[in-house]
Image (cartoon, helix red, strand yellow):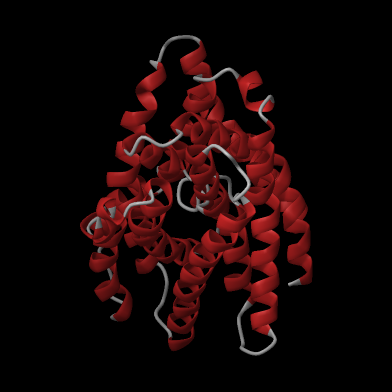
Amino acid sequence: MYFLTSLISISLLVALALPGYILVKTRLLPQDSSKAFTVFLLYVCQPFLTVQSFIKSEYTPELLKNLGFVVLFAFLFLIGFTLLCALVFKGVRDETARRASIGVAVFSNCAFMGIPFLQALFPSDPTPVLYCNVFVIVFNLLAWTLLVFVITGEKKHISVKRAILNPPTVALVVALPLFFTNAAVPNEIMIPLDFLANMTSPVSMTVLGIRLASVKLKELFIDLRLYFASAVRLVAVPLLSLGVLLLFRLFCPLDVTTVTTLYILMAMPSATIVVLLSERFGSDSSFAAKATLLTSVLSFVTVPVLMLLCNFI
């Protein structure tokens, strides 16, 4: 069931990526237009989606407990796999490529790919997207601290301010009071909120389509280091994550939706923020960009296959 559903979901996401790809190839959009779409996605769509997911989820003690588990595992996975991948990529001679490889392998595109996939896989259940938004809060916190340190090797570049003051976190501050009080939001507010929140998937995939159109795909398949980093990101990390989740489940109750959502988020391709931070701090941004695009392409195959294991959760 999960394989077929995820295959259909991935196919839908590919279809959403096609307009951006075609528009760039036909020169109706400039190659750097993904930056504008990304800003709109980060500062408008994603925050509204965060608020929407909390409003549409009814507060219960059980749900709050599961949100706590999501926060716990987000920290556990991102910190734990960073330490593990530091050992895995220790043999890479080029230091900037080694640092970029760690970031590429650990930090998944949990927001811009994870949210569209979860929306397609669970169209009538807002809970997985809610879990994803909470995961993204931890992700951003560690991206501007742990990931910056991985890329630069220097503590002076760590930005606690950026880790805390970002659109998803601000949206969370707005959404939590509404969530805990189960507040009824008027339709006059919900209708425009829904419109903007529901733009997340098409805009996310438009960005991916634009980026794929902006590179020569053959360049993605000639560097063996890219294959190794992609294998760690798309196969090793998700499988280890699922193993940890199932082991934890033996000793503590953890519902299927929470386990499945976390597993899916860890199976997503590499995060764009690795490329952005690599560019900003002078690391190997070219390697990071190619690895991000390669994992995005390969994920259309690996994710449905990995979803077969969801039948055993």
Please state the horizontal and vertical placement of residue 127, each as a whole percent of the image: 50, 68
| Residue at x 33%, y 45% (from the top left corner) | 42
Q: Nearer the viewer, residue 309 or 272?
A: 272
The image quadrant that residue 49 belongs to is bottom left
The image quadrant that residue 267 belongs to is bottom right
| Residue at x 48%, y 67% (from the top left corner) | 74
61 lies left or right of 169: right
Q: Nearer the viewer, residue 306 or 97?
A: 97
| Residue at x 35%, y 32% (from the top left corner) | 37
Q: Is residue 201 visible?
A: yes
Q: Nearer the viewer, residue 68 or 190?
A: 68
Please state the horizontal and vertical placement of residue 19, each as a whole percent of the image: 51, 24
Please state the horizontal and vertical placement of residue 51, each as a whole percent of the image: 32, 61
92 lies left or right of 49: right
- In the rendered image, the residue lying farthest to the top is 26
Q: In which quadrant will I find the N terminus?
A: bottom right
On screen, residue 167 above or below 98 = below
On screen, residue 24 above or below 16 = above
| Residue at x 64%, y 54% (from the top left corner) | 88
Q: Is residue 194 visible?
A: no
208 lies left or right of 296: left
What is the count of numbered marks? 0
Q: In which quadrant will I find the C terminus?
A: bottom right
Please state the horizontal and vertical placement of residue 76, each as a whole percent of the image: 51, 71
80 lies left or right of 196: right
